[in-house]
Image: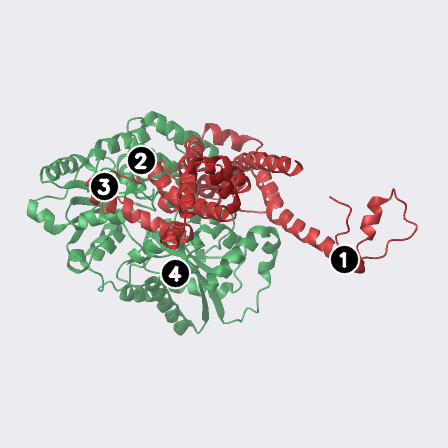
Amino acid sequence: MSDLPLIRADRAAPPPAAATPTGGRRRRVRLLSGTDRVVVTLMVLVPLLLVVALVWLPAGATVLLSGTDWDGIGPISDIEWVGGRNYADVVQNYPPFVPAVQNNLLWLAALFVVATPFGMFLAVLLDKELRGTRFYQTALYLPVVLSLALIGFVWQLLYSRDQGLLNAVLGTNVDWYGDPGVNIWAVLVAAGWRHVGYVMLLYLAGLKGVDPSLREAAAVDGASEGRTFFKVIFPVLRPINIIVLVVTVIESLRAFDLVWVINKGRNGLELLSALVTQNVVGEASRIGFGSALATIMLVVSLLFITVYLATVLREGRR
Amino acid sequence: MSRPRTRAEYLARLVPPSVAGLNRRSLLAGAAGTTALLGTGLLAGCGSDSGGSDAKTVSLGSNQSDPKPKEVVAKVVDGFQTSSGLQVAVNTVDHNTFQENINNYLQGRPDDVFMWFAGYRMRFFAARGLAGDLSDVWGRLSGMSDAFRKASTGDDGKQYFVPSSYYPWAVFYRKSVWQQNGYQEPKTLDDLTALAGEMKKDGLTPIAFADKDGWPAMGTFDILNLRINGYQFHIDLMAGKESWTSDKVKKVFDTWRGLLPLHQPDSLGRTWQEAAQSLQQKKSGMYLLGLFVGQQFDGDDLADLDFFTFPEIDPAIGAKALDAPIDGYMMARKPKQEANARKLLEYVGSKAAADITVKNDPSTLVANGEADTSGYSALQRKAAEVVGSATEIAQFLDRDTRPDFASTVIIPALQQFIKDPKDIDGLTSSIENQKKSIFTD
């Protein structure tokens, strides 16, 4: 950060003549007028309070509740502390937990290996200004805009075993949603369908921002199309690449809506987020147990966020 | 979980409340629920600021959010307003939202009277002091059978619930298909197996089956358990008192395993509507479900629908018990207008209210035995007779046990069983271990 004043000189309080050269820190504070100081304080305090009240307090409460067996009924003084029992139960005594972790990982792998690269590929194609680009763009982005209820319904029409389009067209009898070996793949297709559109739009926005002179320079140097992309464009798009990567990780960690619409995250479609919801929300009210699951999710998310922040900060320092 | 009454309601349920077009009131109720969650302790003390005891109002929390049932509730309420001169403020909340928020609702500022179901959850609310004692109302009710009184009684022997309607679970079939093939209603399990064998020969799927939503298979488990081990064992098992690893439970699963090949395959991807349609389209021979299966049948098809109760398995147990979930009303722990609330509860349990319901809603059975049931269809009349002659009435698995146990343990376990019926020992010990971690108090 430079020592330049952040505000216009005519609005700043005049620096006292006797200011010593060593009191740099104090001098900078005095550069702000009274109103500015109030504004700055508010701008820091209000988001801070919001973040604490809406993010950190609930997260802390979740961690605390995960050590209890609260059922959501009765005063807080009645809550009984059970220590790590919920965690032991989650790992040893809850059959859906292991499949949920596996499915979350599978989700991450599928989005990362298939959906994200495919979205990028489509973005590169659309960046070529083909005829009807706007139509393709809209068509591919549509799944991201559609309400989740509608998406669940659309895929139910395709996948239904007895009445679905897919079995009718293929003449097969596959139980797309009911067979636990098949349904996760069926859902991943639906999830990928959405994710491709999302990544495509993000990446297209990035590609539009690339300086055309870079391409021209590469062309003048005789680089092929593919080489231009991988050696020039892709490295230039590093910030977008990081955003796409983070979006992919976050999407696969918080994947929830599709499986919930299909069968509430049971029978082959277990996901951590769905298990948390099954236990906490609704009549079940196994709040302590569900909080333990939520805490596990929180820890996994924190791992990814820490890695991401560490990378970004290291970039910034360079 | 209450069964959807109409196809429209089922479809509406696919839409989570966050996306569905919520009306302002349910949004407010949701906001109130959230507030209650944040400040349960604070709000608990606020409920006592009641108006004068001479107020002419009473509030009713209704979960009947669909047009038809909502209209019936409005008619019953009209009847009460006319006969008592009191004003009823009906607060209708989306059915699923109501059920999911019930904990917060009851601890916050519930309406004086609210709708709920008989069963474990009702007794649980009563035991936790979240519902008012209605023994005096029962003293003035007439036309209620002993079975309904039993179903309305809490653990302390007092009544906390006024039943209004119910529907039985039974094995449904199409009369025309059965006449054509000369099938007879089976009286024993062997008869049933033999009949299913004939149906297979005739190219039918013997028993339609669907369990995508997790709850329909509970009906199969319940009826097998009731036939093999009897009503008392069912209640004790649901209350967590009996072991799931006992031979009795294993025998239920073992019998079910024998019947599974007669069921429609790939049931975990099918909704009950699709299974019901296979019965309607004469592709399946029979279907074990609640009376609401009739929602998938129209006009002549509906008249063609008939049913029998699940056949006897153990002659010492008989075949007289069945699942017949009961819907009704309860009173908040500290109603603002207690006297009026009791009057309303007495009315909704009366013959007058039952008569209004029969006249306006052809899809339910009313609890009051004195009601004029001449408006019933043949199917309704038979259903009422079957329930009337039942020795014991169970409420369905997810109403007879803790909701957390039913939804987070039993649903995955039964689906696991349907997927892989071989490993009964592993399955039952997994259920038992999870049960021990849930039934701690």
Which one is in front in this view, the residue at disc 2 or the one at disc 1? 1
C-alpha span from label 4 to label 3:
36 Å
Residue named by callout 4:
B65
Q: Which residue is mark 2?
A: A182
Q: B112 or A76, which lies in front?
A: A76
Give the letter of the green chain: B
Is disc 3 surrounded by few (<14), some (14 to 19) or many (20+) residues within 10 Å? many
Spatial separation of the CA atoms under disc 2 and disc 3: 39 Å
Task: Tell me which chain the residue with mark 1 is part of.
Answer: A
Label 3 to label 1, Cα distance in Å? 90 Å
Q: Is residue A165 above or below residue A174?
A: below
Residue A255's x, y, as percent? 45, 42
* Residue placed furthest toward the right: A18
Q: Secondary structure at mark 4?
A: loop
Q: Share a chain, discs 2 and 3?
A: no
Q: Which residue is mark 1?
A: A8
Classify mark 1: residues with Cα within 10 Å, few (<14), some (14-19) or many (20+).
few
Kind of element beneath mark 3: loop
Instruction: Check the image and report above or below for B197 versus A144.
Output: above
Residue B369 image position (x, y, % from top left)? 29, 59
